[in-house]
C-alpha cells in the first residue's frame, strides 16, 4: 500500500459514497476531486452539475473554478446558474458537497461571520449557492478538517441549513422531507446523523485515530453510531487515478 495523506484519504472516502447513476452538485477543490475519482472508478455514469451551468461534463482534469471551461468539457449542456438551482428545487439532485468556517451538532453551516454579525472577528464571503444546494438537494456532504473551533455546538451565523434545531425543524421551515445532512468527512473520521435526534454521530474512524481524539477535537458531545467501523484506506488504484488523472498538478492533494 502506498503512503497517502489526509486529503487523499478524505477524497477517496467521499468518492465511495457517490453511487453510479446518481446526481451531484459540486464546486471546485476536494468535492470536485471526489466526483472525478468516482466517475473514473466505480461510477462512470455519475451525473455532475456545476453551479455555473455545466451539466454532466466528462472532466479531463481538475478545474480551478466553477466557471473554468473544463467544467463544460463534453457536457450534455452548457446552461446557467438559474437552471442548476431550478434542478435542485425540482428534487433532481441527490448529493451536494459544501463547507464552511463552522459546523454544528445538527449539521448547520456558517460561512458568513465568526462572532457577532455586526462586529465579527472574521467575515467570510457568505453563502454563494450553498444555502440553495443544502435546502433542496437530498443529501448534503461536507469535507473538512476536524477541530473544536470548527465543530461547535451552535454556529455563530446560520448560512446554510442542516437539521436546524433538530427533528422536524427542516419540514417546519418548508424544506423537503427526508432531505438534509448526510455525511461529514474529516481528517479523523466519517460522521453521520442520528435518525431520531438528528445530531451528528461518528460512523467510521480513520486508521490511527481513536474516538477520544475525535471527541477532543469536537466542541460538542458526539456519540458513536450503533455500528462503528474503521475507514478503509485508499487503494493503490484510487491513489494512482487521483494523482495521475484527477489532480496531477496537486491543486488539492498537495503532494
Image (cartoon, rainbow, N blue to C red):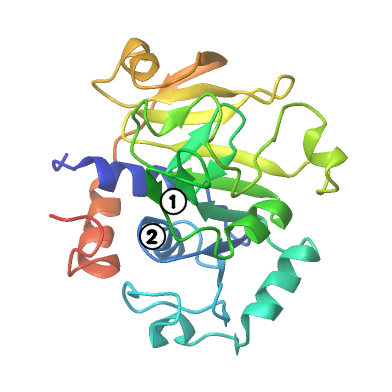
The residue singled out by tag 2 in the image is 37
Nearest the viewer among 114 and 93 is: 114
Nearest the viewer among 92 and 238 is: 92
Residue at point 87%, 39% (across, down): 172
Residue at point 69%, 55% (across, down): 137
Q: Earlier in the sequence, mark 1 or mark 2?
A: 1
Q: Which mark is residue 15?
A: 1
Image position of 49 with respect to 54: above or below = above
Q: Are marks 1 and 2 in contact (CB under 8 Å)?
A: yes
Quick one: label 2, few (<14), some, or many (20+) residues within 10 Å?
many
Alpha carbons under labels 1 and 2: distance apart: 6 Å
Image position of 147 with respect to 138: above or below = above
Quarter assignment of residue 132 = bottom right
Image position of 215 with respect to 104: above or below = above
Q: Mark 1 falls on what kind of element?
A: helix
Q: Mark 2 falls on what kind of element?
A: helix
Amino acid at each position: 500500500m502506498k503512503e497517502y495523506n489526509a486529503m487523499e484519504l478524505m477524497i477517496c472516502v467521499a468518492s465511495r459514497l457517490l453511487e453510479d447513476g446518481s446526481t451531484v452538485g459540486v464546486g471546485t477543490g476536494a468535492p470536485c476531486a471526489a466526483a472525478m475519482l468516482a466517475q473514473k472508478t466505480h461510477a462512470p455514469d455519475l451525473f455532475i452539475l456545476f453551479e455555473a451551468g455545466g451539466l454532466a461534463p466528462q472532466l479531463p482534469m481538475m478545474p480551478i473554478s466553477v466557471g473554468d471551461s473544463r467544467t463544460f468539457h463534453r457536457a450534455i449542456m452548457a446552461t446557467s446558474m438559474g437552471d442548476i438551482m431550478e434542478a435542485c428545487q425540482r428534487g433532481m439532485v441527490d448529493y451536494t458537497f459544501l463547507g464552511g468556517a463552522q459546523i454544528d451538532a445538527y449539521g448547520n453551516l456558517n460561512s458568513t461571520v465568526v462572532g457577532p454579525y455586526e462586529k465579527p472577528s472574521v467575515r467570510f464571503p457568505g453563502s454563494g449557492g450553498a444555502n440553495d444546494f443544502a435546502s433542496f438537494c437530498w443529501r448534503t456532504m461536507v469535507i473538512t478538517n476536524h477541530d473544536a473551533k470548527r465543530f461547535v455546538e451552535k454556529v455563530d451565523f446560520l448560512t446554510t441549513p442542516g437539521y436546524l434545531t433538530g427533528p422536524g425543524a427542516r419540514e417546519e421551515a418548508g424544506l423537503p422531507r427526508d432531505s438534509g445532512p448526510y455525511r461529514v468527512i474529516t481528517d479523523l473520521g466519517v460522521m453521520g446523523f442520528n435518525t431520531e435526534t438528528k445530531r451528528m454521530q461518528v460512523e467510521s474512524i480513520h486508521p490511527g485515530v481513536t474516538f477520544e481524539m475525535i471527541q477532543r477535537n469536537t466542541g460538542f458531545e458526539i456519540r458513536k453510531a450503533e455500528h462503528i467501523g474503521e475507514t478503509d484506506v485508499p487503494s493503490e488504484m484510487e491513489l494512482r487515478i487521483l494523482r495521475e488523472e484527477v489532480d496531477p498538478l496537486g491543486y488539492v492533494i498537495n503532494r
